[in-house]
Amino acid sequence: MAVALILVLVVVGSILFHILSPWWWSPIASNWGYIDQTLIITFWITGAVFSAVVLFMAYCVFRFRHREGIKADYNPENKKLESWLTAVTAVGVAAMLAPGLYVWSQFITVPDDATEVEVVGQQWQWNYRLPGEDGRLGKSDNRLVTYENPLGIDPDDPYGQDDVVIEAADLHLPIDKPVKMLLRSIDVLHDFYVPEFRAKMDMVPGTVTYFWFTPTRTGTFEVLCAELCGTGHGYMRGIVMVDTEEDYQAWLDGQTTFARLSAPPKVGAMDAVEP
Ligand SMILES: [Cu+2]
């Protein structure tokens, strides 16, 4: 009796904890409300199955408790029970997977008007690159990474010269404009994750992964690395600011291009003075 009661309390406690818990997702800041809906469907299905299984177990513990002179039936096979349990499980699993597949197909279908933003992860900081006036990112290669060329941009590719390079600083994005995030890593696995955007993806050295989203509200959001990438993993934080169009342009105008970064330093008046 006590065990059955504890099992019932586990179910009631779990449901109350879910309803009354002060912890919930941070408010969404992108178009990916679908991802939240998919998670909620999964919560409902797994919650219902968990409650049903534990309550059934409590019922069995109570109903079939030990009594003198009563022996259990040996009933190893029950075709009818097995078929409807299989059918119910199949429907439950399909209901959890189908919305995910639907969202995934949208997640990887990038709209034509999305602008590209490259994110480069390295131990342990975030760098970014935006296409310049030509609207195209130049070629890059991890073998070209040097102190002066931290993103490994190909200096011989004319498309790369006007690329905007943001090294270990905040990224800004304009509101309501779809962006395709191109993800690169120059050392180990990282994962670019902004919880409010509800989108993330692993960054694998040697390849470029991507996802897209549209920021839907202005604000300052924290970037986390969601892939254990070494001793500094916990400090691999960054900031993404979603701006109005004017604020974004003002920020963009103050950024440096690859051409300017890699230009030889000018000899100033101070250098000309003999000691
Ligand atoms: Cu990392």
Image (cartoon, rainbow, N blue to C red):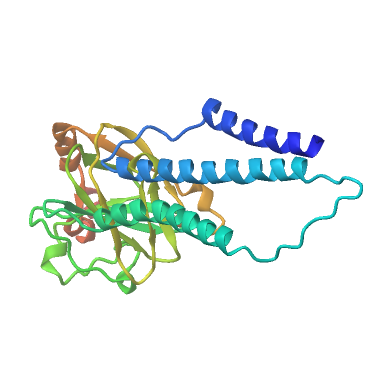
How many numbered marks have been drawn onto this rendered protein structure? 0
Furthest residue in direction bottom, as rendered: 143
The picture places residue 161, in percent across and down from the top left corner, at: 15, 61
Furthest residue in direction left, as rendered: 134
Establish if 271 lies above or below 74: above
- Quadrant of the rendered image containing residue 159: bottom left
Furthest residue in direction right, as rendered: 68
The picture places residue 126, in percent across and down from the top left corner, at: 37, 52
Establish if 42 lies above or below 13: below
- The N terminus - image quarter: top right
Q: Is residue 275 visible?
A: no
Q: In the rendered view, does 106 fall on the left or right side of 91? A: left
Comparing 4 with 258, the one in front is 4
Which residue does the image show at 38% across and 46% down from the upper left? Answer: 38
Q: Is residue 265 visible?
A: yes
The picture places residue 5, in percent across and down from the top left corner, at: 74, 34
Which residue does the image show at 26% across and 41% down from the upper left? Answer: 31
Comparing 76 with 252, the one in front is 76
Which residue does the image show at 54% across and 25% down from the upper left? Answer: 20
The picture places residue 191, in percent across and down from the top left corner, at: 41, 56
Establish if 262 lies above or below 56: below
- Quadrant of the rendered image containing residue 177: top left
Which residue does the image show at 17% across and 57% down from the upper left? Answer: 163
